């Protein structure tokens, strides 16, 4: 059951529109900075999402990863093929069902994911230092709400 809101529909539309415009722009700006500073070919956002998912769900199958990432299995299969060719992912056949493959990060992938994550964090921290204390406090307070919003959108997208 959805939570009750005292906000007017107009206020909700304003916040929704602002987030819909701002969040992709934030991601693009961060991507450009990381692309510029990362010493390797940076994985695409979809590849990075898959690598991060495999990192936290070692041995996941393509189908399970596709469901969790809200992607089509054939798109995840294409990403797996690309990442395997780049030496970032390993496909290991299931012991009982040879049609099923389990995904595992290579040590190179673990290092690159950590490097990208660290670089993103550094760029965000640098940008945060340029904000006022009030703006930083507001963003700090919003992190939990944004995480809840992401979960809600993820849940309804299934």
Image: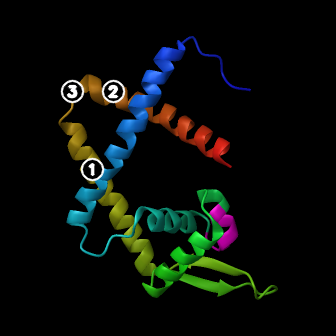
Which residue is at a point 62% across and 65% down the rendered structure image? 57
Q: Height in image: 152 above or below 97?
A: above
Magenta extent? 58-66
- The residue indicated by pointer 3 is 132
Image position, residue 158 (x, y; %): 68, 49
Q: Is residue 61 magenta?
A: yes
Image position, residue 14 (x, y; %): 43, 22
Q: Check whether the beta carbons of the residues at disc 2 and disc 3 lie within 8 A of each other.
A: no
- The residue indicated by pointer 2 is 137
Q: Would you say 16 lies left or right of 3 here? A: left
Is residue 60 in view from this perspective? no
Q: CA distance from mark 2 to mark 1?
A: 22 Å
- For mark 3, give the secondary structure: loop
Q: Residues within 10 Å of mark 2 (few under 14, many from 20)?
A: few
- The residue indicated by pointer 1 is 29
Q: Quadrant of the N terminus?
A: top right
- For mark 1, give the secondary structure: helix
Q: Height in image: 55 above or below 25?
A: below
- For mark 2, give the secondary structure: helix
């Amino acid at each position: 059951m959805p939570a009750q809101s005292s906000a007017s529909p107009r206020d909700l539309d304003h916040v929704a529109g602002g987030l819909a415009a701002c969040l992709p722009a934030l991601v693009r700006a961060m991507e450009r900075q990381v692309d510029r500073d990362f010493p390797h070919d940076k994985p695409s956002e979809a590849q990075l999402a898959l690598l991060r998912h495999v990192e936290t769900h070692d041995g996941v199958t393509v189908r399970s990863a596709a469901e969790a990432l809200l992607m089509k299995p054939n798109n995840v299969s294409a990403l797996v093929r690309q990442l395997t060719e780049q030496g970032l992912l390993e496909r290991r056949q299931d012991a009982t069902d040879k049609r099923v493959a389990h995904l595992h990060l290579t040590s190179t992938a673990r290092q690159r994911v950590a490097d990208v994550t660290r670089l993103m964090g550094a760029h965000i921290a640098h940008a945060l230092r340029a904000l006022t204390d009030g703006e930083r406090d507001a963003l700090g307070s919003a992190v939990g709400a944004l995480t809840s919003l992401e979960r809600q959108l993820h849940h309804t997208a299934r």
